[in-house]
Amino acid sequence: MVRFFNVLFRGLIFLAFLLLFSCLTNERSNNDSVEFQRDLADILVDGKIVAVTDYDAISYFIYKGKPMGYQYDMLRDLATYLGVKLEIITESDIDKSFELLKSGKVDIIASSLAITAPRKSEVDFTLPHGQTSQVLVQRFDENGVKVKQPLDLAGKIVYVQKSSSGAQRLKNLKDEIGRDITIVELPNYDADKLIELVSTGEIDYVVCDQSVAQVKENFYKNINIDVQIGFPQEIAWAVRKTSPELRGKINTWLEGYLKTAHYKRIERRYFSENRFNKRASSDYFYIYTGKISPWDEYFKKYSKEINFDWRLLASLVYQESRFNHNAQSKVGAKGLMQFMPATAKFFGISHNEKPEEQIKAGVKYIKWLDEKWAKYGVPKEERIKFVLASYNAGIGHVIDARNLAQKYGKNPNVWENNVEYFIRHKYDFAHDPVVKYGSLKGTETYLYVKEIMDRYEHYKNIIGE
């Protein structure tokens, strides 16, 4: 009998444990299904909005060293309207973009997403910023085109971007005609890349947004986009369902923004065939050529000498001269690195030196500045900003700003909101006893560092190491 009760007691304990484990598992599962909470107030406090967009020849790209793009320009204007910084993540896989949004890693999907019922069940869309249709992209041959209507796609292999509205439209078409269409969804290929594959003959058929296909039609002369696969759909950005205030703020902005002449210029800039063809024919349209300047090989070569990311060196040179090796400023600075005559003399180069020698000398100067700031104890992760500021204003002004920071209770080894504050306001502290190198209207230096670092982030988004 005692043995019976012992067994019964153990059984009850085991059952209780199972019930507890089940409850914990269910609770964890329920918590996992809760969407990330972050809305407008959190973004404003953080001072930053994070967006995911496509890296392609229209949305976001690098052209002659400059970050550009339809989605990029609009996002930059939105960030200015909100009074926050903009951070961009690139992702061509639509499913992954949705995952990034739901997990809280981004605040907005800034792509030309077609508004569909399945997507509306997952996210909230902003006001539409346009319309598009799905079209078939195919090649001309000596007999014209093979597919003249959607029914002709029966038995064909058609490529689409994974989880795109084109993929969904093809699945619906397959059901509507009751015949088989082989649909190949590629996760890491956007419409831009797929259209190129059609033009080169690697694949025969692609379905994509008409807005993209129209731009590409005049660049690839052997493609045809006349066959409509679907009806017009509105396109918009997407936010989490837990971000209603952000959505409302964006909609308020879009309502006026989309009517402005400024927005119309952005549309023309990226959807004009002539402008696209001009970019696409350049040697420095990175998405096609893998180059941002004529001097990339020198940036890569000499940046290694100072353990510098070549993309950061390129961003500095763009800021100085826009990659023009014959550039000359009003104050007498010359060349790619914009050396003043005294600095050029110090490093033993002349104004007409070859571009490689100009870059080599510039790297020597950067190394000299870096070593100086290392002796001051500025940590490596902060030092680059001190180096950039010194390159622009001279090391003496930055030493003054650092001394002011130390005097007034700021961290002298941190740039942002510390030493940077006293660079911006150095003119107001010109008579402070710790100032040894005179006054400076430091807003230019502040913007110089900020713009180089911002551009560097865009380079890292798009350009491989």
Image: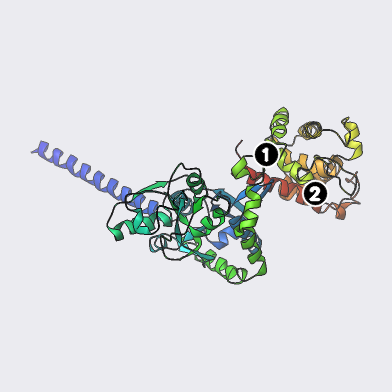
Disc 1 element? helix
Q: 272 left or right of 369?
A: left
Residue visible at 69% across and 46% down in the picture: 64
Percent position of residue 196, x then y: 52, 46
Disc 2 element? helix
- Nearer to the camera, 335 or 339: 335
Q: 393 left or right of 15?
A: right
Of the two numbered discs 1 and 2 in the rendering, the one whose residue sits closer to the viewer: 1
Q: Amino acid at mark 1?
A: Arg
Percent position of residue 383, x then y: 73, 38
Percent position of residue 442, x then y: 82, 51
Q: 1 left or right of 411?
A: left
Spatial separation of the CA atoms under disc 1 and disc 2: 20 Å
Identify the residue under disc 2: 445
Identify the residue under disc 1: 311
Residue visible at 81% across and 31% down in the picture: 357
For the view shown, which residue lies furthest in the left direction?
Answer: 1
Report which quarter residue 360 is drawn in: top right
